[in-house]
Amino acid sequence: MKDNLNHFWRLAANGLCLFALFAATAVLSAPMPSGGLGINFPTESENSDSEESESSDIELPTWEVRKKAIDAFYASKVAEERKRLEQQITDIYTIEFIKTQIRRRVNTPSMGDFRILRIPGIEVDWSNFNQDPPKSKESIVDEIRDQAIEHAIDKIRPDERRQNILDTADERFRMVQINERVTLMLRDGRGPAAYIEDQPLRGVNDERVQLGSRFIIREDLDEEAQALFYPDVNARLKEAYIVNSLGKIDVELESFVTQECYEKTASGFLENNYVPDITKPTASLRTSKPDFWVSKKSFVQRIRKALVDLGVEAFEKQEMPRIMTQEGYYYVPTEDKKGMEWVDEIEKIARETLPSPSSNENGMPGPPPGMGPGPGGTY
């Protein structure tokens, strides 16, 4: 009995499945009412119109935007090359380059005159090129001058000589006293009467001097002779003698100091990691002028930068045209015709389609300036 019931329920289930399948087939085969399921699917013609509409809505970036992108690409390539050169051109490479330029006596506008760094008997030590100067140029100059002054004092002994001058002045310009005997020559005197020998001083006034039995007019005596008898003339000549003599000592001292500074300041700069500035034509390995010297470290860095700049310049002239051409860019005149610039194909075509300045009013190209019509009266 139980088995019969199970068989009955299986038959009923199969019948229900067949009925459902038949009903679904009937629904799908019936015509779809207007609107269908509420979804409007575009036809093939509608699809093509939509695609054309979307494509027409896409706008290309303006030339200004594209130009910035081109310039950015160019700058990026140049920056990459600069970075590569900075890694390749090391300090050691730069030092070897400097030595070669010195040996070859090269004078180049972009870097300077390397001949300045080559003088017989003086050789620059480049082993310490990366060390900052231990002393400033001002302190070097001051130290060498102080040492030179000490050497000058030891050799010239100015204080002793000054005292000797003062003592000599007192003796040389001592005035004659009454009854003291005098020997002198009259001013512009000629003959035996112009010479007065060993005559005692009898008296002096503003107009004349009495020597022995002779009265001599003051104007007949030169200044040195008058200084023997007249205090105002004596004081003036004595002061002039002292000032002149002391001045000679000062000049001698300064000359000694200047010469020693000239001989030792240049070597002091070299010992403290300085080299002459080869961009200044009057610089020298012997000059004592601080303005003509630069630190060795900054000198090497400057030459290294110049080498990198020259490499970048060569890259822009030789490699960048090839790179830009491979990227599909064109080197054309600027819009104002005053220079050249890189453009993309879109801009190139746009400029080529613009009427040229020589086109006639119909847009057709006219003859070059100064040219008339061609054969048959046509251009």
Image: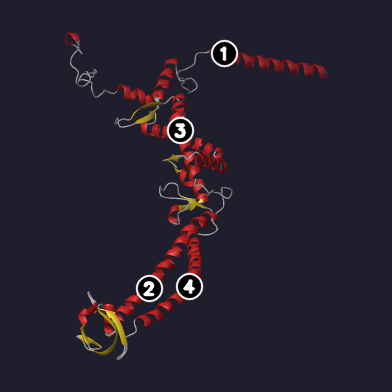
Q: Position of residue 315 (x, y in %)?
A: 47, 32
Q: Position of residue 321 (x, y in %)?
A: 43, 27
Q: Say what amino acid the circle numbered 1 marks.
A: Ala
User: Which label sits in the foreground, 2 or 1?
Assistant: 2
**Of label 4 and label 3, which has the lower sequence position?**
4
Q: Is residue 226 left or right of residue 38?
A: left
Task: Identify the secondary structure beneath mark 4.
Answer: loop
Task: Identify the secondary structure beneath mark 3.
Answer: helix
Q: Say what amino acid the circle numbered 4 marks.
A: Arg
Query: Do labels 2 and 3 touch, CB within 8 Å?
Result: no
Q: Residue furthest front?
A: 192
* Disc 1 target residue: 26
Image disc number at residue 314:
3
Q: Is residue 360 left or right of residue 172?
A: left
Q: Residues within 10 Å of mark 4 (few under 14, many from 20)?
A: few
* Disc 4 target residue: 157
Between residue 185 and residue 227, name the one nearer to us. 185
